[in-house]
Image (spheres, helix red, strand yellow):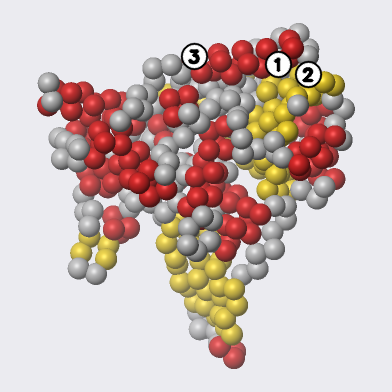
Amino acid sequence: MAEVLAAADLGVLLGALRARGYRVVGPRVAAGVIQYAELDDAGDLPHGWTDEQAPGRYRLARRDDDAYFGYAVGPHSWKRELLPPRVRLWQASRDGLAVEEEETDYQPTAFVGVRPCELAAIAIQDRVFLDGRFADRDYAARRADVFLVAVECGSPSSLCFCSSLGTGPGATDGFDLALTELHAGEHRFLVRSGSSAGNAVLADLPTRPAARADLETAEQVVEAAARAQAGRFAAEDVHDLLLRNLESPHWDAVAERCLSCGNCTLVCPTCFCTHVEDTSSLDGETAARDRVWDTCFSLRYAEMHGGNTRPTTRARYRQWLTHKLATWEDQFGTSGCVGCGRCIAWCPAAIDIRAEVAAIRQEDAHAHA
């Protein structure tokens, strides 16, 4: 079932979510980027803005229409909500040697503006943190009461390649509500429900049944976004390609450019490396342990008793790329990449993983010619 919601009534959707007790988080312009933050009303959305992206470059620009979701993705991902950069695990006091775990009673949250590639990223992190032998307590508590409002992509950046990986630009599952922004004629949204919770919210909205023209226009939006990405990334056999080229000289060429800064892992919606920090007060009365984001590009990340397993930039970049596109599949049954392009835009050295895979593919073809 599909309904049509007038663009002018988008605020009604946000109000319906708040009325159900959800904290509403979505895209808004701040500090020169589109980032995720709490929304008070539809006026907070990036109305009339788009993003221009290239390797090592991200800029906001005005659109020539009034689209609410006329951009691709910014530096934030929903990982910041579900796996925050810093989480207090426990704290202790000398008084009675009491150790207390942090509370995990989080407010239900609605994520508004989730791109299909981000739905795929959330599903990947669900496999990592929920589907293993031991579920992560904090992640499970944050994930339990999340309402997902997806928005199909109509304005992919030059770095997007979700269509090559099957993670977009259309939303097929994993959402409570899915919106497609339509501009032909009336500015409106096609709305589809994907859950019983979605049905309940949809019933409270001032919608009308979707006509055939609405459905056809929505299909055209998604198809145009997919065509715009055609040929950007060759995903076939990338798993075997990378694993049989672990000693490729191209890893040295990448290492000469890579700064090991970890930007790619910080903006990635699926990277999940963390470590713990132990601190104590100056008077020795209290102590605490926090979990913080880490990166496999850090020199110390691979330190263990007996030495460092990845002491060079070459080794660390190879580990990241082969894990992301190959051994992640062995571990979790899916690629660790969803084709959002963030790692390309926010790399200060403008390293493009699509170009790196293509270079290794070319070397491999010459070697086996």
Q: Name the image quarter holding residue 122.
A: top right
Q: Nearer the viewer, residue 24 or 366?
A: 366
Mark before the other along the chain sequence, 3 or 1: 1
Q: Which mark is residue 210?
A: 2
In the picture, measured across the screen, residue 147 lies left or right of residue 94, that is: right
Please name the amino acid that badge 3 sits on: Arg
Q: Is residue 125 visible?
A: yes
Which quadrant of the figure contains the N terminus? top right
Q: Nearer the viewer, mark 3 or mark 1?
A: 1
- Residue 220: x and y in percent read 61, 13
Mark toward the start of the polypeptide (1 vs 2) = 2
Would residue 286 be found to the left or right of residue 7 on screen? left
Query: In the rendered structure, which amino acid carries the disc numbered 2?
Result: Ala
Among all residues in the image, which is located at the extreme bottom?
96
Check disc 1 and report the residue beneath it.
Answer: 215
In the image, residue 79 lies at what x, y percent? 54, 47
* Cα–Cα span, label 3 and label 2: 25 Å
Which residue sits at x=28%, y=39%?
Answer: 258
Q: Which mark is residue 227?
A: 3
Find out whether the residues at labels 3 and 1 contact each other: C-beta distance under 8 Å. no
Could you give the CA–CA distance between mark 1 and mark 2, rounded to whole angstroms? 7 Å
Q: In the image, is residue 365 above or below residue 137?
A: above
Element assignment for label 2: loop
Rendered location of residue 357, percent (x, y): 29, 30
- Please tell me which residue is depicted at 65% across the width and 25% down the height of the picture: 69
Between residue 89 and residue 170, name the one nearer to us: 170
Labelled pair 3, 2 in contact (Cβ < 8 Å): no
Verify CB contact (< 8 Å) between mark 1 and mark 2.
yes
Check the image and report above or below for 212 versus 176: above
For the residue carrying disc 2, how many other residues have a C-alpha within 10 Å: few (<14), some (14-19), or many (20+)? Answer: some
Q: Is 357 situated left or right of 90 in this image?
A: left
